[in-house]
């Protein structure tokens, strides 16, 4: 639940303060015991419940030798009444302000060491990973937690000691308010008189320390380095071009892909969409500089090999350092944003680059088609449930969704069409963020043509449905990865779109048969071929991917038809693991929904936030009636 860390952190503070033997120690005990007495039944974990009960028993309920002062006794009498005590509220706020004024870095370091040691002793991971990853993550976790759950304006009302200052927002009502003005516009039909093509690549994840012949089946989450040791047999050897499994690819495989595009596809495509995640998966030994350098190295390669093709990039969750955490409340991201904005400016334009520099997201306009086409690049770190900075406040970080609404509103007024690009599919983001994003897609489905995302490393689609009717209003195409990490062949997609309506009518997957090139010792990047593995229309038996009736038919088959599921399963990893399913599973179909709650309900399971997601809480505001997007 949301106060798990408050409980743990409270115990730590009590242990630190109680040694002073003064009134502060009694107030510390009082604050936390009052909360637990009131809320103990809300713990849904029996271990946590027992811990809280034991704490109460030892500290207050049966401690006859307690030295609680007369002042605290009076406060306790006040809080047991129906009203709020001004004195009590001031005492609580003073206490938490004093806590925030302490050197929390010291306590944070002690807690970090405890977690690192526990992770190692319990063999959750190797000591190297425990000490590296926990050491990287702890500051953002503790900062986010302290700024939320030690904030007197937030925690004192939660403890029943002050009137509410912040109020949980009704996100469902906000979503309904967004869609109330949705125009009833018939989806256009492609003319097919003329088409254009563009390429989508994602999750390149290369490893600059990849070593051919190294152990590809090591004991840590990423392998194929000299530190991975020697393989036990030939099947565990890292190949020249990569290894299908728990290894990222060498940079030469990225070079081979870009060279193939240059030699065979550059004349066909108008632009490239590049949706992030460029670093390796050795997250426990990364740095801010190394993560930044991996992206700029790919930028330099693209500019060198494809100088006449514009690229529209956006970052993923791995560009950040540490992984997943993106600071929307400080200046931690400024340097990387500035570097990326500068390197992307020749592609996305000066105005868009400045927008990215300031905010981490942008929009850019293409004017060569029958109508202006706006590319909107979303930073999904704002909805990432592992971005610990968001514990502080998950409510529309950096006002990105508000910016998205305003940008879409202006695009509608200017008769523009829109492609939205991003990294994490919306069903993988926090529920409240996903709800609002989904509502915005419905409201502006008259101008949003399609969406293009990555992150999963698999070929997938996600389908946006109208609230209440489940009628399809938009499709998100999720492309497979160039990295082999997770068990895929390197791949990318080329879309063909109608020139008049800009609707994508088909796409083709291109993939490298990694095993073939490794086994045949082909080492010339000019000889590497990314073969057509399938195109959507031919593979699934349709004539136009933009027709929502065809998408609805496909979804029906994906839900109940084993043959369709096997086809979908086969191309998800670009033919790397040609095995057949033996029975229908709901998972493939339910993954097409665009909020965590909708996915759970599809699986027949009531939606319930896990204990980590509870830490982020729901959206909140000082104004209980705040609709945010009015």
Image (tube, helix red, strand yellow):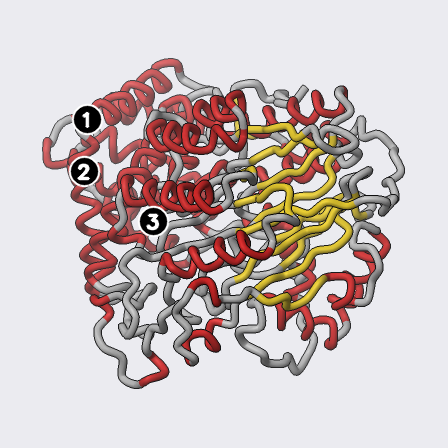
Circle 2 SS class: helix
**Residue pointed to by mark 3:** 52
**Residue pointed to by mark 1:** 102
Q: Are marks 2 and 3 in contact (CB under 8 Å)?
A: no
7 sits left or right of 424 in the view: left
Q: Which of the marked residues, 1 or 3, is nearer the chain's N terminus?
A: 3
**Location of residue 486 in the rendering, given as x and y in whole percent from the top left corner:** 46, 66
| Nearer-the-camera pick, 165 or 300 | 300
Residue at x 65%, y 22% (from the top left corner)? 406
Residue at x 36%, y 70% (from the top left corner)? 240
The residue lying furthest to the top in this view is 86
Q: In the displayed structure, would residue 549 be above or below residue 232?
A: above
The residue lying furthest to the bottom in this view is 233
What is the C-alpha distance between the residues marked 1 and 2? 9 Å
* Badge 1: residue crowd in 10 Å (few <14, some 14–19, many ≥20): few
Q: Which of the marked residues, 2 or 3, is nearer the chain's N terminus?
A: 3
Circle 1 SS class: loop
**Location of residue 349 in the rendering, given as x and y in whole percent from the top left corner:** 53, 26
Residue at x 36%, y 34% (from the top left corner)? 144
**Location of residue 183 in the rendering, given as x and y in whole percent from the top left corner:** 84, 29
Report which quarter residue 368 is drawn in. Answer: top right
Residue at x 44%, y 49% (from the top left corner)? 277
Question: Mark 2 or 3, which is nearer the eye?
Answer: 2
**Residue pointed to by mark 2:** 107
407 sits left or right of 91 in the view: right
Q: Are marks 1 and 2 in contact (CB under 8 Å)?
A: yes
């Amino acid at each position: 639940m949301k106060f798990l860390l408050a409980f743990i952190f409270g115990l730590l503070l009590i242990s630190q303060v109680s040694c002073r033997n003064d009134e502060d120690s009694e107030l510390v005990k009082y604050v936390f015991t009052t909360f637990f007495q009131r809320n103990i039944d809300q713990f849904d974990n029996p271990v946590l419940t027992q811990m809280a009960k034991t704490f109460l028993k030892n500290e207050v309920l049966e401690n006859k030798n307690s030295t609680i002062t007369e002042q605290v006794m009076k406060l306790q009498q006040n809080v047991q009444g129906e009203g709020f005590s001004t004195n009590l509220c001031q005492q609580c706020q003073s206490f938490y302000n004093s806590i925030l004024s302490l050197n929390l870095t010291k306590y944070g370091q002690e807690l970090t060491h405890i977690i690192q040691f526990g992770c190692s002793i319990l063999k959750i991971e190797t000591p190297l990973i425990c000490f590296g990853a926990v050491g990287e993550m702890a500051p953002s976790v503790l900062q986010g937690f302290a700024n939320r759950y030690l904030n007197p304006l937030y925690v004192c009302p939660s403890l029943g000691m002050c009137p509410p200052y912040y109020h949980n927002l009704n996100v469902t009502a906000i979503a309904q308010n967004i869609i109330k003005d949705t125009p009833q516009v018939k989806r256009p039909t492609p003319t097919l008189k003329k088409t254009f093509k563009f390429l989508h690549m994602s999750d390149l994840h290369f490893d600059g320390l990849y070593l051919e012949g190294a152990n590809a089946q090591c004991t840590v989450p990423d392998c194929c380095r000299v530190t991975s040791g020697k393989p036990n047999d030939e099947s565990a050897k890292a190949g020249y071009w990569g290894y299908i499994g728990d290894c990222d690819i060498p940079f030469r495989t990225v070079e081979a892909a870009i060279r193939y595009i240059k030699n065979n596809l550059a004349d066909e495509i108008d632009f490239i969409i590049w949706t992030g995640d460029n670093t390796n998966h050795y997250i426990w030994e990364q740095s801010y500089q190394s993560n930044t350098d991996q992206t700029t190295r790919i930028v330099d390669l693209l500019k060198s090999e494809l100088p006449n093709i514009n690229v529209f990039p956006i970052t993923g969750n791995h560009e950040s350092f540490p992984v997943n955490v993106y600071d929307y409340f400080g200046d931690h991201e400024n340097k990387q944003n500035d570097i990326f904005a500068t390197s992307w400016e020749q592609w996305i334009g000066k105005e868009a680059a400045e927008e990215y520099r300031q905010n981490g997201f942008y929009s850019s306009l293409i004017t060569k088609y029958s109508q202006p086409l706006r590319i909107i690049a979303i930073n999904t770190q704002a909805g990432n449930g592992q971005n610990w900075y968001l514990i502080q406040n998950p409510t529309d970080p950096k006002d990105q969704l508000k910016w998205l609404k305003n940008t879409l509103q202006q695009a509608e007024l200017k008769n523009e069409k829109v492609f939205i690009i991003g990294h994490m599919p919306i069903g993988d983001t926090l529920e409240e963020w996903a709800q609002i994003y989904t509502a915005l897609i419905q409201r502006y489905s008259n101008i949003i043509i399609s969406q293009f995302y990555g992150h999963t490393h698999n070929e997938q689609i996600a389908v946006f449905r109208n609230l209440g009717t489940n009628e399809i209003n938009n499709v998100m195409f999720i492309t497979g990865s160039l990295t082999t990490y997770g068990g895929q062949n390197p791949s990318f997609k080329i879309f063909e779109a109608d020139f008049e309506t800009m609707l994508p009518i088909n796409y083709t997957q291109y993939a490298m048969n990694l095993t073939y090139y490794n086994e045949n010792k082909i080492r010339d990047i000019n000889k590497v071929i990314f073969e057509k593995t399938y195109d959507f229309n031919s593979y699934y038996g349709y004539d136009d991917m933009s027709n929502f009736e065809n998408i609805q038919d496909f979804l029906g088959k994906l839900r109940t038809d084993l043959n369709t599921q096997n086809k979908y399963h086969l191309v998800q990893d670009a033919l790397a693991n040609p095995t057949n399913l033996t029975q229908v599973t709901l998972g493939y179909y339910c993954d097409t929904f665009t909020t965590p709650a909708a996915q759970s309900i599809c699986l027949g399971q009531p939606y319930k936030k896990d204990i980590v997601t509870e830490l982020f809480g729901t959206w909140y505001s000082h104004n209980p009636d705040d609709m945010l997007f009015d």
